[in-house]
Image: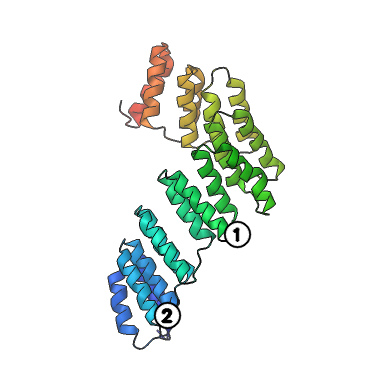
């Protein structure tokens, strides 16, 4: 086809094979081509990623040693790939070993590395360890970015360090010149709502617009959930829905309709719940079977025969069984 057999072309071929999880074939191709084509660091990074993607981390580490034997130094990208694989297997003992090994070789983790490890530990609810990783990063002189701070705020909220999370949001990010994006604000809203602090969450929602950002459905969902759980908050819920749909032209999705219908059924507002159900079906969003069952039960309990018949007709038409 007139293509030159060079390192770039070899890497393209190996990369495609590894992404298709045909890494054994990729290795055979490499054995054939490498005596004639000089591999580079990217060649070995392809294999490290390929082995890690199929959970064969030992082969990935062997590849790093092979890389070194060729006079090529593994980069932070190389090691971060291995660290991510260990995190996915929740083998944090090896994570710390690899981190220490990187330091000994003068290959220092970057903010992406630390953020990934911290988020992985938080996902496993190892909150104090995750916080220690954030301290390790800061003490190493590695500069945090927006993604790091978003992950840190989420971690602090989940580990009941609300004051510290607010300090990071209000003080530390501006002090370090790190911009806050919509995810940052949404994380704060979610945190405040999870602790029942609706007024603080609403204040953060107002700040989004003050920063010339546009809220999304994720900005409103925790607020709707919080105020739906409180009796006598119908006006607040209606105001939020009006803002969401009319002011910001956002459409409700399946999860939000489900949240609203279930929440309204819990507080006994079956009429409004059915209106949302009817609206949902009308725009061809199929409700979950549990939503149908719940609304049907509530309508039957309140002798709302017309609604019962309509819900049953929907369930029969679309094969939703109780």
Residue 283 visible in the picture? no
Classify the position of the C terminus by image quarter.
top left
Which label was assigned to residue 188?
Answer: none
Can you say whether 230 is above or below 98 in the image?
above
Q: Residues within 10 Å of mark 1 (few under 14, many from 20)?
A: few
Q: Secondary structure at mark 2?
A: helix
- Rendering coords of residue 255 (x, y %): 46, 36
Q: Residues within 10 Å of mark 2 (few under 14, many from 20)?
A: few
Question: Which residue sits at x=50%, y=37%?
Answer: 253
Can you say whether 152 is above or below 300 in the image?
below
In primary-sequence order, the first of circles 2 and 1 is 2
Q: How is the image coloured?
A: rainbow
| Rendering quarter of residue 218 | top right
Residue 321 visible in the picture? yes
Which label was assigned to residue 9?
Answer: 2
- Rendering coords of residue 254 (x, y %): 46, 36
Gap between marks 2 and 1 measured at Cα: 36 Å
Query: Marks 1 and 2: in contact by CB < 8 Å?
Result: no
Q: Nearer the viewer, mark 2 or mark 1?
A: 1
Q: Which residue is mark 1?
A: 143
Can you say whether 248 is above or below 315 in the image?
below
């Amino acid at each position: 086809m007139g293509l030159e057999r060079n390192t770039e072309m070899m890497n393209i071929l190996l990369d495609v094979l590894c992404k298709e999880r045909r890494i054994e074939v990729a290795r055979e191709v490499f054995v054939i081509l490498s005596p004639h084509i000089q591999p580079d660091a990217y060649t070995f990074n392809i294999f490290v990623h390929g082995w890690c993607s199929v959970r064969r981390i030992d082969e990935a580490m062997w590849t790093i040693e092979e890389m070194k034997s060729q006079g090529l130094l593994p980069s932070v990208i190389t090691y971060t790939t291995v660290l991510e694989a260990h995190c996915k297997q929740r083998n944090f003992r090896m994570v710390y070993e690899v981190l220490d090994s990187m330091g000994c070789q003068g290959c220092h983790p970057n903010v992406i590395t630390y953020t990934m490890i911290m988020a992985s530990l938080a996902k496993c609810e190892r909150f104090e360890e995750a916080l220690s990783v954030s301290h390790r990063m800061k003490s190493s002189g590695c500069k945090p970015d927006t993604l790091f701070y978003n992950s840190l705020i989420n971690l602090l909220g989940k580990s009941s360090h609300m004051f510290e999370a607010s300090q990071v949001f209000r003080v530390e990010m501006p002090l370090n010149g790190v911009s806050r994006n919509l995810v940052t604000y949404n994380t704060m809203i979610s945190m405040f709502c999870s602790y029942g602090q609706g007024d603080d969450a609403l204040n953060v929602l107002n700040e989004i617009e003050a920063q010339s950002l546009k809220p999304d459905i994720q900005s409103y969902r925790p607020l709707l959930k919080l105020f739906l759980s409180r009796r006598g908050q119908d006006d607040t819920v209606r105001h939020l829905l009006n803002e969401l749909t009319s002011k910001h032209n956002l459409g409700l999705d399946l999860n939000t309709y489900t949240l609203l219908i279930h929440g309204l059924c819990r507080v006994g507002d079956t009429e409004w719940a059915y209106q949302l159900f009817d609206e949902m079906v009308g725009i061809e969003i199929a409700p979950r079977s549990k939503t149908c069952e719940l609304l049907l039960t509530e309508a039957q309990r309140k002798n709302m025969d017309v609604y019962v018949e309509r819900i049953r007709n929907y369930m029969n038409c679309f094969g939703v069984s109780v």
